[in-house]
Amino acid sequence: MKLAEISAEVRRFLPFYWLIISVVLVVSDYVSGPFIQFPVVYLIPISLASWYNGRSWGLGLAVILPLIRLLFGVALWKIPWTWIDAGVNCVIRIVVFSLFAILIDRAAERTRELSKEVKMLNGLLSICSSCKKIRDESGEWQPIERYIAQRSDASFSHGLCPECSKKYYDHLFNNKS
């Protein structure tokens, strides 16, 4: 689903969905104990948050989830390895998850940019066969230059092609008096 297609009200609640998914994964991680390590599932809420809500949400989850696992290991599980080992493991996860969140966010930004370009270049346009004005979404007729300039980065300069020059202004250049 495209972000632009999601209503504003649903978009407002998306972070809660990512948090709920994160809580479910953290609880399942806690229940499975310290010896079954499958933190790769943390990539699910991190990637969804990065894609739909941006880099800050993805990075937030990329930091919080490994820290919660470290808290479980140190405070609740009485892990057989040292605090230093658990801390180093936590830092590695934070770095990897953060890089993943940044990559997902960059991919989402690029996808949105490409989607804008495709949307801008697609579709049928009503154009006047005489004056070449274009009818916009609201039904108003606009000069083609303004229509395209509002929807793209294009700018225009005006000139005359040789055919129009000859057709409309030939009398000025071929005046043999």
Image (cartoon, grey):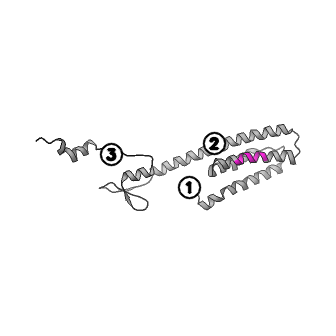
Amino acid on which the number 2 mark rests in the picture = Leu
Q: Residues within 10 Å of mark 2 (few under 14, many from 20)?
A: some
Q: Earlier in the sequence, mark 3 or mark 1?
A: 1
Few, some or many residues within 10 Å of mark 3 (<14, 14–19, 20+): few
Q: How many C-alpha atoms fall within 10 Å of the one at disc 1: few (<14), some, or many (≥20)?
A: few
Residue 93 part of the magenta segment: no
User: Magenta segment, principal secondary structure?
Assistant: helix
- In the rendered structure, which disc, 2 or 3, sits on the residue that comes first in sequence? 2
Quickly name the residue at label 1: 4
Instruction: Report if residue 63 lies within the magenta region.
Output: yes
Q: Nearer the viewer, residue 107 or 170?
A: 170
User: Would residue 151 be found to the left or right of residue 175 on screen?
Assistant: right
Badge count = 3
Magenta-highlighted residues: 60-67
Point out which mark residue 158 bears: 3
Looking at the rendered structure, the secondary structure element under dot 1 is: helix
Which callout, 2 or 3, points to the residue nearer the camera?
Answer: 3
Q: Which amino acid does the dot numbered 3 rest on? A: His
Label 2: which residue?
Answer: 103
Q: Which mark is residue 68?
A: none
Distance CA(mark 2)–CA(mark 1): 20 Å
Looking at the image, tell me whether mark 2 or mark 1 is earlier in sequence order.
1
Q: Amino acid at mark 1?
A: Ala
Q: Quadrant of the C terminus?
A: top left
Residue 89 screen position, x and y as percent = 79, 39
